[in-house]
Amino acid sequence: MAIDCPAVAIARQILDGFDDYREQFRKITNLGRERFEKALWQDIQDASAERIQLYKVCVEQTQTFLREQYGDDVLLNIGCWPEIKESYIGQIDLRLDDELSETWFNSIFNSLFSHDLISDKCMFVHSTRPELRSNDAPMQIRTYRPQGDLAASLRQISEDYRFAVPYENQERDLQRLETQLRASLPDWVCKDPELCIELYSSRLYRNKGAYLVGRVFTQDEQWPLVMPMLHREGQGIRMDAAIIDEAEVSIIFSFTRSYFMVRVAYPAEFISFLRRILPRKHISELYTSIGFYKQGKSEFYRALIDHLDSTDDQFVMAAGVRGMVMSVFTLPGFNTVFKIIKDRFSPSKSVTRDTVIDRYRMVKYVDRVGRLADTQEFADFRFPLAKFDPECLRELLEVAASTVEVQGDEVLVRHCWTERRMIPLNIYLDNANEQQISDALEEYGLAIKQLAAANIFPGDMLLKNFGVTRHGRVVFYDYDEISYLTEINFRNIPEARFPEDEMSAEPWYSVGPHDVFPEEFPRFLFTDPKQRKLFKELHGDLFTAAYWQGLQEAIRQGKVIDVFPYKRKEIE
């Protein structure tokens, strides 16, 4: 019996759900300026987590409404969905966020069909939207033409982007910004009568900073430009720096950072603007960086299937020590690793599968302070069997048979996370010269300290669980033992009662499940005595319980500690 399919009405209800999500997203985002001006630092953290959770909540609400309205006989009839999709395309054609609405449609479809029956007939595996209008001038920009008077342009910028809170010392800041720009740009640029400064009209907010983002350009060359602004409670706003180095700007938009909050009426337009100044950043990273992480996920997936279709690349096991909880594989020509949970863990691991899933999801909501790699979670990935190196597939089937399955000429990966590929720190150190070792160990200690300042304790801090990015930053990426710092009980090792105690294989003192003894870190973290000695010189405070206890006390008092995503001079 044929089922009547009210395709237009269903498409309309899906789009209504999207409109509700977008409105709530905007409300959270648009309060960014108020939170910054009022120095509501904890509210900023809470709002960031709320906005991430919002997508899932709204999808579930929309799915529930559709089921109540139309019933499963209609909604789960796959034959209806090509017609629903066709109607939906017509309804989104004149929207300014049409690419996001396609991804929303995919989320509703997948929530109903549990990520099964994925095809372009029923959903948007490939987008029907035009490519980003990279050659169109963005409408929401402000343009400044110094014509030899850079100081006047900077002053105008400071006035145009003024907050309700006064500047702490506007003259000092303007002088510093001009000095930094003149020192960073070639001499002739500041004198070029064609010199232009473009800034996006909306500020970007994240943690304790507001950011002006744009570019400096002449007829022949361009440089990215980011100008961070800080609110120092009780003192005012500080225009902190003028950054034009592409690598440093890229780090500000890094996959290791929390998402910006920025008013964006036309997302594709803003992403196009960002791609001008950061051409090496993939579109998926840029969407994710401004809070549209589901769109980032869609763009990542499309890039992945395009790569598989257009290259002979095969999946291989990732370099590094094999994990005790996760199995990790990669595509050599695609800068990503794929992580799946093993069926059985090493006996030394006390975590469960559910615990691991919770901890990986937790990372999405915390302040990553540039030291945790962002992840995307996928269900029911299907890849061509021919795209797997036989040794890789054999290992995956051996250690994760419940997750990886061969079905005909396809490999089904039921559940995985994707993460940016980095060089494992232990491998990096094995191949580094003395200066690189010193720099990497300095970064390693800073990574641990900055995570701790954000109330994150990595748990397993072995070198193999950290990676080195292309910018030389050290990032933690193994989350199965991660926890909040305030959950840990940092202790000093009690003095031995008798000389024999120190010779015993077992401790002479009780050890609780959350007890950690920082004095033990040196021998656990370093097998190389030279590296152990150097690290102690650089970050020996990490080996004392008092250091960790001090951070815990600051966090419990509600202090949000500054961790800046750029190099900066000390406050004058």
Image (tube, helix red, strand yellow):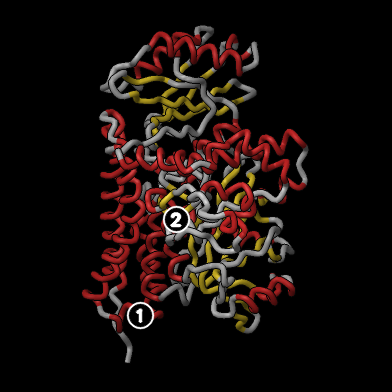
Q: In this view, does 342 lie above or below 447?
A: below
Q: Which residue: 44% across, 71% down?
A: 122
Q: Is residue 171 above or below residue 441?
A: above
Answer yes or no: is residue 259 visible: no
Camera-side mark, 2 or 1: 2
Between 386 and 76, the residue placed more toward the observer is: 386
Q: What residue type is labelled 1?
A: Leu
- Tell me the tag on residue 76: 1
Q: Quadrant of residue 4?
A: bottom left
Q: Quadrant of residue 47?
A: top left
In the displayed structure image, the side of residue 196 where residue 503 appears, left or right? right
Res 356 visible = yes
How dense is the environment of label 2, judged by Cα within 10 Å: few (below 14), some, or many (20 and up)? some
| Residue located 32% across and 42% down the image | 556
Looking at the rendered structure, the secondary structure element under dot 2 is strand
Identity, as a three-letter code, of the amino acid under mark 2 = Asp
Q: Percent x, y for residue 41?
A: 31, 36
Quadrant location of the C terminus in the rendered image:
top left
Query: Of callouts 2 and 1, which one flags the residue occurring earlier in the amino acid sequence?
Result: 1
Which residue corresponds to the image point at 54% horizontal and 32% vertical from the top-left?
249
On the rendered structure, is 420 left or right of 109?
A: right
Please state which of residues 442 and 132 is positioned toward the viewer in this rendering.
442
- Name the residue beneath numbered marker 2: 515
Q: Residues within 10 Å of mark 1 (few under 14, many from 20)?
A: some
Q: Position of residue 316 (x, y in %)?
A: 70, 65
Could you say where residue 294 lies in the image, as x and y percent from the top left? 43, 56
User: How far apart in space, not on screen, are marks 2 and 1 (Cα)?
Assistant: 50 Å
The quarter of the picture where residue 551 lies is top left
Residue placed furthest toward the bottom: 1
Please tell me which residue lies in front, 556 or 314: 556
